[in-house]
């Protein structure tokens, strides 16, 4: 049996369009035979990665950057170590080293206007410490990089540097590089698309803009935008032993428990920023449940029959449905040693959920308690392995 942290949330958004398709329409999915608002897992994962930095949850040096401009990043790091190199030579060395390390290919047509390093054709997810290690190796061979790259031991060192397991967000969310499968890393986290618990209609906003420097009574611009206002069910799973394995080379600022607590905080606090200036959709989950268990479950099935829209809103009925589904599923299939904690901003409307969970007063309390339990169970699992 493994050790998993399972997160469930009920979160209500105001009129918003946080994740849209190629036509600018809020994403949707048909579930239970009716259309629902949907937010893709990729959208929320990126918001969480950004939140690690903006909220100071994880040191920037312990994170990664997803970019086609890895050659420029490596050239800048190389310049720090070998300041005597001119820009063109540093970029040339960085290009050769990154291509040797990742099997990516330079897109010479995508050189920047200042004629600096080219982008890569592939988008790469590179840990900042990985870039630093590559820079040190590049500095060793900078005097004759072609000769340096002819030595098998040097190529092996480059591959080892770029596959080091010490970037926290790569450890959490994984990495896939089509050019070199040796760089792939299976994620320790699963994130489900967020779905509305009720039938959702996409509504249209007709808007105008007035020219401040004319006296015309008419509008100078007429436009249309679309939005939804859903109550979402959100779900994610973090597998403790997988996270520990993905951080094999990480021995710096944070423990497994601290990384887990940061993940919980980011899950609760981060929100995709699509059209945020137009909608200010900065809500937080009304219900957040954390469970440490050997058997993780997604409880979207509670809402296959959509929650009916009523004068009292969707939350009370959604909470009751979720509580019923959790109880039935855990009774039939669950881990008898599982522990659950709940944080809610509307305890009067979510009372059915309180029976099987321990009420926590703050996000910090919930995150720290659940993270400590996952770390304990993860250590137990690894000792048995």
Image (spheres, rainbow, N blue to C red):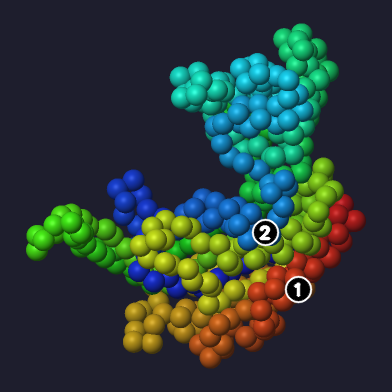
- Is residue 28 something that shows in the picture? no
Quadrant in which residue 72 is drawn? top right
Whole-percent x, y for residue 177 in the image: 60, 32
Q: Residues within 10 Å of mark 1 (few under 14, many from 20)?
A: some
Between residue 124 and residue 147, name the one nearer to us: 147
Q: Quadrant of the N terminus?
A: bottom right
Q: Which residue is mark 2?
A: 56
Image coords of residue 333 (percent x, y): 66, 69
Front residue of this view, candidates 275 and 173: 275
Q: Residue at x 53, y 85 (%)?
A: 346
Residue sitting at x 53%, y 91%:
348
* Residue carrying label 1: 369
Distance (Cα) linking label 1 and label 2: 20 Å
Secondary element under disc 2, as helix, strand or loop, is loop
In the image, residue 70 above or below residue 269: above
Q: Secondary structure at mark 1?
A: helix
Horizontal placement of 312 versus 97: left or right? Answer: left
The residue lying furthest to the bottom in this view is 348
């Amino acid at each position: 049996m493994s050790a998993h942290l399972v997160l469930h949330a009920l979160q209500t958004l105001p009129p918003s369009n946080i994740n849209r398709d190629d036509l600018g329409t809020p994403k949707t999915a048909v579930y239970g035979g009716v259309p629902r608002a949907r937010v893709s897992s990729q959208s929320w994962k990126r918001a969480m990665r950004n939140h690690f930095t903006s909220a100071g949850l994880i040191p920037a040096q312990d994170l990664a950057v997803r970019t086609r401009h890895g050659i420029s990043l490596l050239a800048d790091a190389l310049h720090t170590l070998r300041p005597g190199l001119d820009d063109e030579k540093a970029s040339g060395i960085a290009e050769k080293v990154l291509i040797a390390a990742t099997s990516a290919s330079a897109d010479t047509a995508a050189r920047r206007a200042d004629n600096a390093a080219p982008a890569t054709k592939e988008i790469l997810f590179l840990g900042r410490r990985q870039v630093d290690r590559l820079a040190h190796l590049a500095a060793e061979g900078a005097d004759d990089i072609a000769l340096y790259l002819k030595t098998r031991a040097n190529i092996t060192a480059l591959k080892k540097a770029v596959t080091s397991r010490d970037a926290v967000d790569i450890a959490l969310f994984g990495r896939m590089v089509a050019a070199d499968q040796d760089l792939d890393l299976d994620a320790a986290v699963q994130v489900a698309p967020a779905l509305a618990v009720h039938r959702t209609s996409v509504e249209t906003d007709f808007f105008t803009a007035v020219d401040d420097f004319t006296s015309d009574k008419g509008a100078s611009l007429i436009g249309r935008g679309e939005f939804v206002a859903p109550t979402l069910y959100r779900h994610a799973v973090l597998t403790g032993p997988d996270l520990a394995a993905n951080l094999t080379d990480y021995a710096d600022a944070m423990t497994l428990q601290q990384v887990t607590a940061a993940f919980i905080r980011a899950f609760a606090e981060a929100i995709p920023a699509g059209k945020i200036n137009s909608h200010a959709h900065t809500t937080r989950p009304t219900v957040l449940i954390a469970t440490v268990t050997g058997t993780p479950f997604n409880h979207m099935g509670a809402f296959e029959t959509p929650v009916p829209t009523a004068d009292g809103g969707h939350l009370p009925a959604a909470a009751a449905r979720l509580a019923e589904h959790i109880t039935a599923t855990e009774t039939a299939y669950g881990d008898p040693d599982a522990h659950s904690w709940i944080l809610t901003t509307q305890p009067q409307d979510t009372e059915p959920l309180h029976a099987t969970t321990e009420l926590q007063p703050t996000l910090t309390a919930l995150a720290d308690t659940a993270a400590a339990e996952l770390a304990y169970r993860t250590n137990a699992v690894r000792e048995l392995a």
